[in-house]
């Protein structure tokens, strides 16, 4: 008897439906074809033990299984449940009437218990697109899959539940998730709040501007000045994710198997890889490409602490994703594109010892030592960072203050209002949502300067010896400062403030 059941394979962040054809005929043997990997080939042993322990058996006949399309490589143990149900239906041990209406996925233990799989959200989206009645998954994956409306999502613990469901002996209830309620959860950040940061008012202002315009930012200062503390609090002032952003982010984390017993990701991700990270772990890749840190930080923050300690070739591979906001990984047989629209927040010491030039401090670095250390970061990478700011240590009188600083909630309100202005401004442009994404053409259109402002910028660039690459960055940042003040026009004081945030372009820092 020939039976068709359906599974799904995830490539990139999208799923492809896999038709599993099971044919049982006279003879003896177990033949699995259609480019399965070792984990799928080993499934016969897991399936045999699981069925035996639940009073069912692999038929002692010739079993031929084809996984179509046959030229597409299938990987992982998530097809165990698909194959088991196909074998039971083809051998007549369970009814085959309904099995073709569902996508069935799950890794089986030897006792028939089910283990979680990767990419459940992508699989559910594809199942709805192709008109399947529902999807049967391990109970751990059911919340993320249930985000998809108009699809029955069944979570099961054991293969026996699935067997009884198709035999009509047991009724499974579909999981229903209220996405609006999920979306409204966990929007507060009780652990990390800008109210905990003593002093550093100018740096907080910088972080607010960066959050409002989606600008990349680098913090330069000695150890203990608060660079990491400030960076960790940046997500708390970013505007809440839209439903579309939440779905995109959840899909990426689902593909990597990082979502366990949770549904929609409502908080913007914060990723902080160690400086020993390889280029593959940062941008993604491998023989079977997986998303890297820059994709896991999509719609959130990527924090690179001690930037010059990262290998130069690792940092250089980020240049193209920073510009294009996506990363394409090419292999001989296929090409995968992962989204990577993130805010880069980097921190660094000004010298190997960590201290500025200081005659009173024996640890202070010389001008030459500072330049040698800073030159570890290439100009093209710095070109993609809009805001450079020096972080100085907090004086004792500020540290000992009992007065609470402004909370993240208050700052986020201003940031959100500025983002709303930008959303309206760019509503007719695809893939442009905030100021940091503006092209040179849009900068000329939306950052037009009055004569006085233009003269100020010219004077500053000449006197401070600012590089040509600083020009567009200053205009973008000044546009964001104007948006925070709800100003239609970029004024002189907006330009003046933006000029302060280009420390590394000044003579004496990099030469």
Image (tube, rainbow, N blue to C red):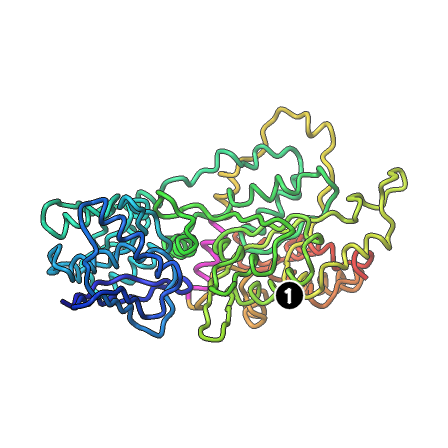
- Front-most of residues 510 and 126: 126
| Residue 48 location (% of width, % of height) | 26, 52
Residue at screen point 48% across, 37% down: 189
Residue at screen point 24% across, 53% down: 136
Q: Is residue 34 above or below residue 269?
A: below
Question: Among all residues in the image, which is located at the extreme front?
Answer: 27
Say left or right for 359 vs 249.
right
- Front-most of residues 361 and 157: 157
**Residue 482 visible at all:** no
- Quadrant location of the N terminus in the rendered image: bottom left
Q: Residues within 10 Å of mark 1 (few under 14, many from 20)?
A: some
Residue labelled with disc 1: 472
**Residue 467 visible at all:** yes
Say left or right for 113 vs 279.
left
- Quadrant location of the C terminus in the rendered image: bottom right
**Magenta stretch: includes residue 424:** yes
Q: Quadrant of residue 134?
A: bottom left
**Magenta stretch: includes residue 202:** no
| Residue 178 location (% of width, % of height) | 27, 45
| Residue 334 location (% of width, % of height) | 44, 73
Instruction: State which region is magenta.
Output: 416-427
- Front-most of residues 370 and 461: 370
Residue at screen point 30% across, 60% down: 125
Q: Label 1, secondary structure: give it.
A: helix
Residue at screen point 75% across, 42% down: 222
- Front-most of residues 404 and 191: 191
Tell me which secondary structure the magenta stretch mostly adopts: helix
Q: Is residue 155 above or below residue 321?
A: above
| Residue 92 location (% of width, % of height) | 12, 59
Say left or right for 432 vs 76.
right
Q: Give the number of callouts.
A: 1
Question: Among all residues in the image, which is located at the extreme right?
Answer: 359
């Amino acid at each position: 008897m020939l039976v068709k059941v359906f599974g799904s394979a995830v490539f990139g962040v999208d799923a492809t439906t896999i038709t599993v054809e099971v044919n049982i005929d006279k003879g003896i043997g177990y033949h699995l074809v259609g480019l399965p990997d070792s984990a799928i080939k080993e499934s016969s042993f897991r399936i045999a033990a699981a069925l035996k322990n639940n009073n069912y058996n692999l038929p002692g006949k010739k079993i031929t299984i084809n996984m179509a399309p046959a030229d597409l490589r299938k990987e992982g143990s998530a097809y165990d449940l698909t194959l088991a149900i196909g074998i039971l239906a083809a051998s007549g041990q369970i009814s085959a009437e309904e099995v073709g209406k569902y996508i069935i996925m799950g890794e089986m233990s030897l006792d028939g218990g089910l283990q979680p799989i990767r990419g459940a959200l992508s699989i559910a989206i594809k199942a709805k697109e192709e008109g399947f009645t529902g999807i049967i998954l391990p109970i751990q994956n059911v919340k993320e899959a249930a985000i998809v409306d108009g699809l029955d999502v069944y979570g099961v613990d054991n293969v026996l539940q699935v067997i009884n469901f198709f035999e009509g002996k047991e009724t499974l209830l579909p999981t229903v998730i209220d996405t609006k309620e999920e979306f409204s959860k966990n929007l507060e950040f009780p652990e990390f709040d800008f109210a905990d940061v003593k002093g550093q008012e100018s740096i907080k202002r910088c972080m607010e501007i960066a959050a409002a315009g989606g600008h990349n930012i680098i913090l330069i200062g000695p150890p203990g000045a608060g660079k990491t503390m400030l960076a960790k609090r940046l997500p708390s002032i970013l505007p809440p994710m839209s439903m579309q952003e939440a779905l995109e982010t959840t899909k990426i984390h689902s593909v990597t198997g990082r979502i366990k017993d949770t549904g929609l990701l409502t908080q913007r991700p914060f990723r902080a890889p160690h400086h020993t990270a390889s280029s593959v772990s940062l941008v993604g890749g491998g023989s079977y490409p997986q998303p890297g840190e820059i994709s896991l930080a999509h719609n959130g923050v990527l924090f690179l602490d001690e930037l010059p300690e990262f290998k130069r070739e690792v940092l250089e591979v980020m240049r193209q994703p920073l510009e294009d906001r996506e990363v394409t990984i090419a292999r001989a047989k296929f090409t995968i594109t992962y989204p990577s629209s993130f805010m880069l927040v980097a921190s660094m010491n000004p010298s190997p010892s960590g201290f500025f030039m200081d005659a009173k401090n024996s640890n202070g670095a010389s001008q030459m030592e500072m330049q040698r250390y800073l030159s570890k970061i290439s100009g093209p990478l710095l070109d993609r960072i809009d805001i450079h700011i020096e972080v100085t240590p907090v004086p004792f009188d500020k540290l000992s203050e009992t007065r609470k600083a402004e909370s993240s909630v208050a700052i986020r309100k201003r940031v959100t209002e500025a983002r709303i202005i930008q959303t309206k401004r760019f509503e007719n442009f695809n893939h442009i949502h905030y100021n940091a994404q503006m092209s040179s053409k849009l900068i000329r259109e939306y950052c037009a300067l009055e004569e006085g402002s233009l003269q100020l910028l010219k004077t500053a660039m000449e006197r401070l010896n600012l590089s040509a690459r600083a020009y567009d960055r200053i205009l973008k940042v000044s546009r964001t400062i104007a948006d925070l003040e709800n100003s239609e026009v970029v004024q002189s004081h907006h330009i003046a403030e933006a000029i302060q945030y280009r420390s590394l372009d000044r003579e004496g820092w990099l030469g």
